[in-house]
Image (cartoon, helix red, strand yellow):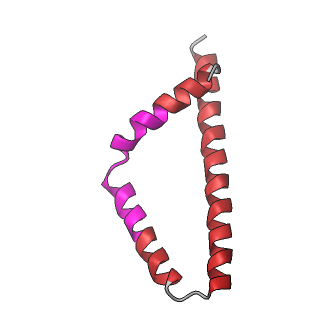
Amino acid sequence: MSDYIDILLTALEDELFPSLGKDYFLSLQQANDALTALSATLTDQQRTLLDSYEDASAAAGSAYQDAYARRAFLLAREVYR
């Protein structure tokens, strides 16, 4: 982890969790409850498709968050120069 932005992103992730707040965790619980209910109604083929969708969606979300945070750090560096 030689890139200083990677170090900052890791520190940000470590510090972010406690500050997410109840709205985040309530929404997360509601999403999990809906997924559980939906999964109970799916065939094996549909469940496989849903799993593929979830994996791709999570990867896209992660890539977006990484790019967003990286750009924020770069902009902050420019502002404070």
Extreme-top residue of the structure: 81
Residue nearest the observer in this picture, 39 or 19: 39
Q: Quadrant of residue 42?
A: bottom right
The span shown in magenta is 12-30
Query: Compared to 73, does 64 lie above or below?
Result: below
Check if residue 53 falls in the magenta segment. no
Query: Compared to 59, does 76 lie above or below?
Result: above
On the picture, is 19 further left or further right than 47?
Answer: left
Q: Percent x, y for residue 60?
A: 67, 54
Query: What secondary structure predominates along the stretch shown in magenta?
Result: helix
Residue at 63%, 32% in the rendered image: 70
Check if residue 25 falls in the magenta segment. yes
Residue nearest the observer in this picture, 61 or 37: 37
Q: Quadrant of residue 52?
A: bottom right
Specify the quadrant that holds the C terminus. Answer: top right
Extreme-left residue of the structure: 22
Q: Percent x, y for residue 32?
A: 44, 69
Specify the quadrant that holds the N terminus. Answer: top right
Residue at 49%, 75% in the rendered image: 35
Q: Percent x, y for residue 20?
A: 37, 47
Residue at 40%, 70% in the rendered image: 30
Query: Compared to 21, does 34 lie above or below?
Result: below
